[in-house]
Amino acid sequence: EAGVVQSPRYKIIEKKQPVAFWCNPISGHNTLYWYRQNLGQGPELLIRYENEEAVDDSQLPKDRFSAERLKGVDSTLKIQPAELGDSAVYLCASSFRDYGTDTQYFGPGTRLTVL
Amino acid sequence: LAKTTQPISMDSYEGQEVNITCSHNNIATNDYITWYQQFPSQGPRFIIQGYKTKVTNEVASLFIPADRKSSTLSLPRVSLSDTAVYYCLVGENNAGNMLTFGGGTRLMVKP
């Protein structure tokens, strides 16, 4: 079974430029997450989708960050314009949420460097 | 939202058993305890989850005392490849509360 796919793996941009990250979750998973992980810290949730609906985006800096999940499958996270402090690894995860467990499967992440 | 406290780092040697304890004093009745493992340049990977007593799988064991205010992840006979960061998460499965990662415990396994 294919895992969560993310692209690109690495991205280097100059500040004030836009950038976009793409995520393809595991087939059949209805829940998709975007996390940001700063160096030496644990992942921080940015937004969570249940199918195509964003149900938790309280940690998403909405002035510059946006996300979408078309047709409840793939998702894109965008930053415009990027700032120096946005340098981090952006992780996508997916799960199949039901009454029981909610095991999240993570992709390898996109490492963003803003110069 | 239950907060977790873990040691920042631990060292061990190959072949030893490693126990990583996580404190979660304000765990709620409906909260589960879940552990993830993260290698450099990879996303976290689910290891084990439990609610009470003991849970064991092919990778690890999870010990949870009766008061559930702490839990211990046990890795039997670690190898160099177990060097990673281990995260303890506490929360309700269906409420999104378990989506908060702390700083984790950096385990270094030495030869």
Image (cartoon, rainbow, N blue to C red):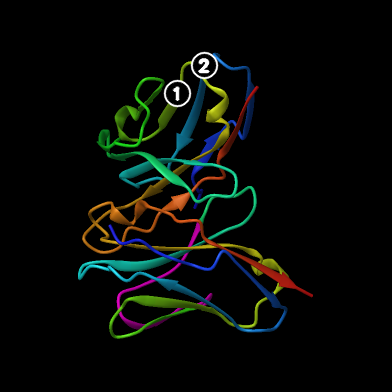
Q: In the image, residue A30 lies at what x, y percent?
A: 30, 45
Locate the C terminus of chain B and report the quarter of the image it occupies: bottom right
Q: Bounds of the magenta span?
A: B45-60
Return the x and y of residue B66 as percentages of the image width and height. 29, 85
Crowding near pointer 2: few (<14 within 10 Å), some, many (20+)? some
Q: Which residue is mark 2?
A: A18
The front one of B78 and A24 is B78
Please name the residue that numbered disc 1 is placed on. Answer: A78
Q: Amino acid at mark 1?
A: Lys
- Rendered image: mark on residue A1: none
Instruction: Tell me which corner region of the image, top left, top right, bottom left or bottom right, holds residue A69.
Output: top left
Q: x, y (%) of residue A76?
A: 43, 28
- Chain-order first, disc 1 or disc 2: 2
Position of B41 compared to A52: left or right?
right
Magenta run includes residue A94? no
Q: Chain of mark 2?
A: A
User: In terms of secondary structure, what is the magenta stretch mainly?
Assistant: strand
Verify CB contact (< 8 Å) between mark 1 and mark 2: yes
Q: Quadrant of the N terminus of chain B?
A: bottom left
Who's the residue at 64% across and 68% down the image? B82
In depth, the one of A28 and A59 nearer the eye is A59
Number of dots carrying numbers:
2
Q: Measuring 43% from the left and 45% from the top, which residue is drawn there? A: A44
